[in-house]
Amino acid sequence: MSASSNTSTTKTELHPRNKHRSRYNFDELTCVCPELKPFITVNAFHIETIDFTNPMAVKTLNQALLKQYYHILHWDIPPNYLCPPIPGRVDYIHHVADILSSCNGQQIPKGKQVKVLDIGVGANCIYPLLGHQEYGWQFIGSDIDLVAVKVANQIIQSNALSDVIECRHQTNSSFIFKGIIKPKEIIDITVCNPPFHSSAAAAQAGTERKWKNLGYKKTGKSLLNFGGQTNELWCKGGEVAFITKMIEESVLFKEHCLWYTTLVSKSENLPAIYSALKRAGVVAVKTINMSQGQKISRMVAWTFLNDTQHIEWSLKRWKN
C-alpha cells in the first residue's frame, strides 16, 4: 500500500461533512494536477506530504484540492497574497450551513436563493468558491484592496461563475457593510476572516511561534508560507477592534441580514466581543469551536431577529 493511499487517520476535529478528514491522497491529486508532484516528499513516518513552509508548494496543493474536490479548474493568486488552507476554510462554510439549517427545520437551504456576504474576500476568493460549489449559494465578496478584488473577479470569470459570485470594492476602509450592502439588498448570512494581529511585528511573531510549535527551525527568512497583505494580517486594535466595528455597524443593517458571523482567532478576545454584542442589543449569539491540526479558533454568530422572524425569513426566502 502506498503512503498516499493510507487514509486510516481521520481528522475528527473537522466538520463531519468536510471532505478532508482523511490524509491527502497524492496519487489522485497529482492525477488532476501534475504540477504538485515535484513538491511531494516522504516524512519520517513514511507518509507522503509537502513542505508547508514553501509558499509555492502550499499554493499548488490548493490548486490540486480545488480541482479534485470542488471542480475549480482555474485558481491562482499574486505573490504575497493570503493562500488559505482549504480544509479549515471549508469547515467554516459547513458550520455556516448548519446555522442556516437551524432556521429551516434542520434542512440546509441550497441554491442561488441563499445569498452570502464575505467581508474581506481577498484575492483568493476562497469562501465564495467553496460555498457555491458545496451548496450552490450566491455570494458577494468585499475587500478594501482593489488588486484583490480584480484578481478575485478574474478567478470568478475564468471558472464561469460570474452569475453567482460578485466581488465589490470597499472604497472607504472606515466602513464594513456601508457601501457594500445596497439599500434594498437582503443577505442571508455573512462570513469574515478578520485580520488577527494588531501590527506587522505581531503578525510575524505569531507566525514564528506557529512554526516553532510545529518543530520547524528558524531559517532567517520570513515563514509566512500562507502569505498575506497588510490588511489581511493585521489592523489597528487587532481582531477585537475589527469585530467590534463590524458588530456596531451590523446594527444599521439588522433587518437586511439574518445572521452575521466571524472567525475569532484568540479565545481571550471573546469577552470583549460578547460585551460589544450585548451593547448592540442582539437577540441571540452562537459560538462554535473549530480546529485544524494545532490551530484552534471559533466562529461567533449573532442575529437581531427572534425565532418567529427566523421562520418567516426561511419561508419567504428559501421555500420558493
Image (tube, rainbow, N blue to C red):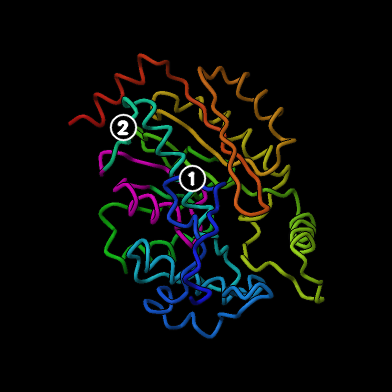
Query: x%, y% of residue 137?
Result: 31, 45
Q: Residue at x 68, y 67 (%)?
A: 224
- Which residue is drawn at the image coordinates 34% and 70% (left, top)? 73
Q: Position of residue 68 (x, y in %)?
A: 37, 67
32 horizontally vs 123: left or right? left
3D distance between C-alphas at marks 1 and 2: 17 Å
Q: Quick check: marks 1 and 2 in contact, CB under 8 Å?
A: no
- Write the start and end of the magenta stretch as one range: 111-139
Task: Give x and y (percent) for residue 132.
Answer: 33, 51
Q: Amino acid at mark 1?
A: His
Location of the C terminus by quadrant is top left
Q: Amino acid at mark 2?
A: Gln
Task: Choose top left, top right, bottom left or bottom right for residue 245.
Answer: top right
The part of the image, by quadrant, that contains residue 317 is top left
239 or 58, nearer to the observer: 58
Image location of residue 307, percent across then percent down: 40, 16
The image's mark for residue 15 is 1
